Structures are given as structure tokens and as C-alpha cells.
Amino acid sequence: AGDLLSDTLGISPSQVDFLRGRGFLSDYEFDVDASGGAGALHHGCWAPRRVDSMAIMVVDALRFDFARDHLPKSIGSRLYPSNITHSAEPRGKSKLFQFVADPPTVTMQRLKGLTTGGLPTFADITGSFGGATLDEDSWVEQLVRVPWQRRRYDKSSRIVHKPQIAFVGDDTWVDLFPTQFDDAHPYPSFNTRDLDTVDNGCLLHLPRLMGRFIGLKTGTQLLQMSPDSPLELIVAHFLGVDHVGHTYGPNNVHMDKKLHQMDVVLSDTLDAIDNAPGESCTALFVFGDHGMTEDGNHGGGTLDEMNAGLFAHFSPGCHAEDDEGLSLDGSELSGPDAARAFESIHQIDLVPTISFLLGLPLPFANIGGVVPDLLPTPKRIDSERISHAPELVTPHAAVALALNAAQVWNYFFTYSKTSRDLPKDRIRQLKDLLDSASLTYRDAIDSSIRLRDDTGKENNREAEYYDSTAYRQACSLFKLFLAESTGLGKTVWTQFNEVGMQLGIFIMFVAWLGGNPFWKRFVRPSTRSAVSHGSPKENTAPSKDSSPLQIFEVVATLVFMIFTCGVLTFGNSYIEHEREITLFFLSVLCLIVLRRRVYISRHQRLWAALPLAVAICARVNDVFVTGHGLDPSLRSHRAHHPAVFIPSMMALATIRRHWFAATR
């Protein structure tokens, strides 16, 4: 982390040492000395880890108004405690946000964004033809790959062995992460008429998984657990709300019943977290991956589809009573762009937030901005007590935002070396903004160092070292840089070239028209022979009449086009299973073409069998080739190398020429 700040933001070695010495940066090799005033801090790869464990509950298609108005027992009771009888037990802190999803608002693309911090692109959608497994860097993969000793919660942790991560619910998660979850219970998600199977599976396994949750155990209980039993992360994905929307719409008695069921299970989970031991910190995120329209659909970019809900809840041990976190509204900056940067939370912003909470490095291709509101101040473990330091909220948030900004700029810089997609003028503007934020942050650190030297290292009033206004100004500038970076990413990677798309549709129509057998009766044989690179004699030779078979091919092709372009596009789950459906239709069409080619080709049966080879190659590609190859963070695949790709295209062109010449 220190090298990243130095290389990207120009933070000097002495400033990095100060940040490490005060516990703002983590270094596993660096042993924090409690006598220096910082206290022993929790491990973390870049910054101190802030929570013991985390639960993520995805309520598919949980629209913002559903979370705000229709879950009174769980979310409502935490947001408006005056409406209920106060409990004798201390309750945790809760916040509800409008959670903006980027189109396409479908589950698989949303889960990719929620785990990698990247934006769904047109290439990403078509990349599902190559398999659903996620190759990009993600916080799920980081949980598996980063050693436990580098990110465990504190030095006195009772857990020596690496805890496990568990999942239950929508099988899309297991499609994306087939080997990462230690305890996985996926349920099929494609049948939108099934309202209860997935949710009932979650209700079956969730109590057992919560019983193994680290954050709900005391130190003695952790010692009594077997090494392979503790869980630091639970992911539960409920599908009932989404399926009710598809089947009945959002304004139906079935939706009321399903939301009540979600309200009960969320309330039970929140009660368990509220009763967690005081020395532990557990976070719960409840959110929708997208919303839904008034007729229950999703997939596009309307407000109802994009505005999901995000409810964040932290156990009582995560915050001091006077620690409200850091809320940035852009008041430190000027201009309309500054205010707009702080208006809402995008779904990709949750990715760096989760990474910092769990003490993980940020995913390489993340362009989301950390949410300071969701970062509790790390605890300080002195010799005899565990305490919070509310006065350090702003400096801790500044470090997180600085690391986030450095990571995003590093990604843009790496991407710009392999692609020309990023406009140079926008990159220069981002660089100027980052330099301004870095300068403000360096000045704030220098001011803290001078105050420490002037007051003496033995001074226990550590809050006097930090000018809250200066650090807050740096936080706002970094946040503005991250918002502008996200905007640039959307401009570059989610734009559609409408002229090119229209040209492609026109070319496809002309190609289809050229292969139509009906028009050939109006063209002289000499013209047809010129098009097919043959001679009139060759093309006028008697052959079997294939017109009925070719008409059957045209009809099957039209049915396929109408079904995929005119019917399935209105089914919101189609995009997640388009690969299987398209390959099935492709195989059927190849077999139909094969029948006619074999029927009319007497002496060149080998070339006539090429349609069968197309279907076989499609299945081979599905098995061995993954990823779309446009992201530098992806694992390189040999099929993407020009030495393989170009000869393959030349071979395909040669085969096509012989194919058409041999079967006329």
C-alpha cells in the first residue's frame, strides 16, 4: 500500500512511515508499538481490517421503495426506532441508501459488477457465449487467495486457521465462482414461475450457517469450534421477490406475502447481529441487484429498474456511541459537478467498501469509489482494553479514499497502454484532479507531522495532530476524482455505436436476402455462376432439387430470429442463459443444413458435413475458451493471441468458400 501511494500520489517515504506508525496503513511485517500511541491494530493488506465477519443478503429485485416502505419489522424498526418499543439491549447502527445499478439490469451482469467493481459492457454481455465463470479479479477471489495471517482481525484472534466462506441461494453465484465457496448450496434460478424453492433453501441453511458465524461468537466459543467450522462471510441470495414480479407484477398480494417473508428472515438475522458480543464487529448488507418496472420486468435503464435499495447494519461493537462515521456532501468543493458526485451510491462503490472492511486489496479493475459512511473506525487494542477513536474518522477515511484513487488511476494507466479507448483530454483532466487531491492530502499529512513534532510524541491527545478540515478537503477531492473516473468508464465502456449496429443489421439482412432461394429464379444462370466463382456449365448441371429443403432452412432461420429477437428479449432471464439457448438453436440449424448438403452433394460428402463441424466447434469453444479478452486484468488465453486468431479466420474463410462452391 505504501508503494502504491508513493508511486501514484507522490507520498514521500516519511509520510508513509507516519501513516504506518499511526496505524492508518497496514504492513504485516511492521509491528505497531502500543507505546507509540497508536495501539496494536488489526491486520489488513492495505489498511486495517474493520469487521470480524460479514453477511451479504441479496434480495433479488429489491426496489428502493420496497426496502423503505415494505419491510417494517426489519429495516423499518432500525431506521425509525421511535415507532417501536425500545429494547433493553444496545442496537447497532443502520443506514439505508438508494443503490444505483448500471444497465443491463440483469442478475449475472450485476453480480459481476458487485464483485469486481467493473462496469457491464456490450462485450461483457456477449462474453457469456464463452462461459459464465468469472476470470476478473474480485473480492471473492481475494478472500480465497490472501493468507489469513495478513488480514485476520487482531493479534489476539482465537482463530489460527483460515475461516471459511459460505453461500446459499441463486446458482448464478456458483456459475461465476465455481470453486471459491467452501460451503455452497446453490438452487436453480431460471424458472421464474417457481416462487419459493430458492427462498426455502435459504431459510433451511441460513440458521445453521449463522451458528458458525465468527462475529456472533465469544472468544471462548471460538476456541471450542473445530478449525474448519468458523465462517467469516455468508452470502444468501433470495429470488422470490424477482420471480413474483415476473409472474404477477409488483402490485399483487403475492408480492405482499413474499416481502413479509423477507421481512421476517431479515428481522431474525438483524436481531442475532444486535446480540453479538460487544468486543466483535459484524456487518450486514441487504440489497437488491436491480429493481423492476411496474409490470415486473427488468434489464433496461429506467429509474425503477436501476434504483435498488441498500441497507447496511453494523453490530453494536463496531462503533463508539459518538462515532457517526464520515458523511461527505461536497460542501468543501465548488461547482455543480462536485455536488453531483455525492448524490447517490452506485453498486460498484460497494466493492472497495467491502474490500476495506475485510482487510483485502482492491480488485485490479475496480473503478468504484469507497463509501466513507460505511467504514467504521478501526478499533485500537491497548494493553488492557479495546476502544474506538472517533476523532480519527476523517484521517482513516482519507487513507481509504487515497488508496482507492491510486488503484483506479493505476488501472486506467495500465488500460491506456493496451487500448486507445480512453480519450486523452479526459485522462489529462483526471490526472489534474488527482494531482490536486494528492497535494491537499500531502499537505494535511505534513501538518500532522509538524503538530506531532511540536507537541511531542508522548502527547496522548492524538486528535490534536489532525486538521479535520484539511483531511476532509482531501477526502472530497478524492471522492470527486473517483466519481469522474466512474463517469469516464461509463462513457467509454457502456456506450453503443448506433451507426455501426444499424450497418451490421443492414449487412445481415443483405446476406440473408442473398441466400434466399426465391430470388434466384429472376437471375440469369451466368450471373449466379459469377457470384459463386463457377462456370455456367457447372452451375447448370442437373442436380437434385433442394428447394423444399432450402425453404425449410429459411423458415427455421426466421423462427429462430423471431424467437430470439422478438420474444426472448422480453424475458429478463434470457441474457443469463443466452449461451445455452443460442448454441442449441445453432446446433439445430446446422443439422438442418447438413441434411440438405448431404442430399445434394454426391461426390463431396466431406465438405457437405461442415455444418456438423460448426456445431462441434461451438461446443469445444464453450468448454475451453473463457473471457472476452478486452480487459487487461483478465487471464490471457491462447485463443486471443493474433497467431491463433488470424490463421483461424483465414481457415474459416477458406472452408466457407469450398463449402459453398462444393454444394452448388
Image: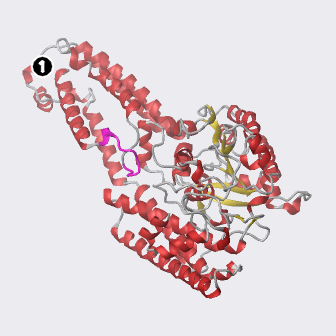
Image quadrant where residue 398 sits: bottom right
* Other-residue count near label 1 (Cα within 10 Å), few / some / many at <14 / 14–19 / ≥20: few
Residue 419: % across, % down: 32, 57
Residue 86: % across, % down: 90, 59
Residue 273: % across, % down: 78, 51
Picture residue at 77% right of the left edge, 59% below the top = 317
Picture residue at 19% right of the left edge, 11% below the top = 602
Image quadrant where residue 356 sits: bottom right
- Quarter of the C terminus within the rendering: top left
Q: Residue furthest bottom?
A: 454
In front here: 169 or 282?
Answer: 282
Magenta stretch: give its range. Answer: 630-640
Vertical placement of residue 612 versus 155, above or below: above
Q: How is the image coloured?
A: secondary structure
Q: Amino acid at mark 1?
A: Thr
Vertical placement of residue 7 versus 550, above or below: below
Picture residue at 90% right of the left edge, 57% below the top = 87
In front here: 155 or 355?
Answer: 155
Residue 326 in view of the camera: no
What is the tally of numbered marks visible in this picture?
A: 1
Residue 610: % across, % down: 26, 22
Q: Which residue is mark 1?
A: 540
> SS class of the residue under badge 1?
loop
Q: Is residue 635 magenta?
A: yes
Looking at the image, residue 525 sits to the left or right of residue 384; the answer is left
Q: Is residue 500 magenta?
A: no
